[in-house]
Image (spheres, rainbow, N blue to C red):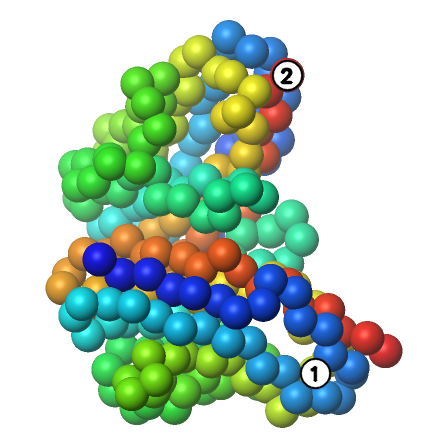
């Protein structure tokens, strides 16, 4: 079985500050890991994915995440927050066994202060 | 390219009524997923299909829920009879590789 835990249901940063959203996973097999973003009244949009290639993954909108097996983590970062980054962010995992369904974390709402 | 298309976007109904949510996946995708999103439970997988065949329906809450995929371009999620606790946003997603592509969701309110 696999699961993800997102630490912090709400994160607030100032515009221009570093964004760090935390995700820890639990998986009995090598995982695929994902970050999705959800804007109000919209569906989920893929930001980036880890599929056992490079451990540092770059995504859209300047976001990146690093897979750390020793820490079972896949934290999402962005060097400089923009007002348009305000949204809810979800970490997700699927096992590298062919089962395609993703298990999602509880989400982190990012607020960006001017 | 068209994304995943869901209808209706909003549905308000009364308890006991039948609700049918519809989904058109991205052309060429062989996996289709139904998720439900609520404040209390977050995103829950209800059921998913591969090549129109249900693979895992263990997340379907109870017999009031049913899902079908009669062909590669259409799926329905039906709730009969609906109850207030079914109020949620229902998402359809499709996939051909590892990542899922989501529709905009159907917001269901059961009074």
- Indicate whether B51 appears above or below A44: above
- Residue B104 x, y percent position in the rendering: 54, 47
Label 1 vs label 2: CA separation? 40 Å
Residue that extends furthest to the left in the rendered view of this protein: A97
Residue A28 falls in image quadrant: bottom left
Name which residue lies at 33% across and 23% down: B62
Residue closest to the eye, B108 or B60: B60
Q: Secondary structure at mark 2?
A: loop
Q: Residue at x 19, y 36 (%)?
A: B54
Above or below for B104 versus B8: below
Residue drawn at 32 percent across, 57 percent down: A102
Q: Quadrant of the C terminus of chain A?
A: bottom right
Q: Is residue B69 above or below residue B19?
A: below
- Residue A85 x %, y %: 67, 73
Q: Does residue A67 appear to the left or right of A64 in the view shown?
A: left
Q: In x, y percent, where is residue B98?
A: 27, 65
Residue A81, numbered label: 1
In the rendered view, does A2 fall on the left or right side of B101?
A: left
Asked whether the viewer can see residue B6, the reply is: no
Q: Which residue is mark 2?
A: B111
Quadrant the N terminus of chain A occupies? bottom left
Percent of width and height locating residue B37: 50, 43
Q: Nearer the viewer, residue A37 or A5?
A: A5
């Amino acid at each position: 079985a696999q699961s993800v835990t997102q630490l912090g249901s709400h994160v607030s940063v100032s515009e221009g500050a570093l964004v760090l959203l935390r995700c820890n996973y639990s998986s009995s097999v090598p995982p695929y890991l994902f970050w999705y973003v959800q804007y109000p009244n919209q569906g989920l949009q893929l930001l980036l994915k880890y599929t056992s290639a490079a451990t540092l993954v770059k995504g859209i909108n300047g976001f990146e995440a690093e897979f750390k097996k020793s820490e079972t983590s896949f934290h999402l970062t962005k060097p400089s927050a923009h007002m348009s980054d305000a949204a809810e962010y979800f970490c997700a995992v699927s096992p590298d066994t062919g089962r395609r369904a993703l298990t999602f974390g509880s989400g982190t709402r990012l607020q960006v202060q001017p | 390219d068209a994304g995943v298309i869901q209808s209706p976007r909003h549905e308000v109904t009364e308890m006991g009524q039948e609700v049918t949510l519809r989904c058109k996946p991205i052309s060429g995708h062989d996996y289709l997923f139904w998720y439900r999103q609520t404040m209390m439970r977050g995103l829950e997988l209800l059921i998913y299909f591969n090549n129109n065949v249900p693979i895992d329906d263990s997340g379907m809450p109870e017999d009031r829920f049913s899902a079908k995929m009669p062909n590669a371009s259409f799926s329905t999620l039906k709730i009969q009879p609906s109850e207030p606790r079914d109020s949620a946003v229902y998402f359809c997603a499709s996939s051909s590789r590892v990542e899922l592509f989501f529709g905009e969701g159907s917001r269901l309110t059961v009074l």
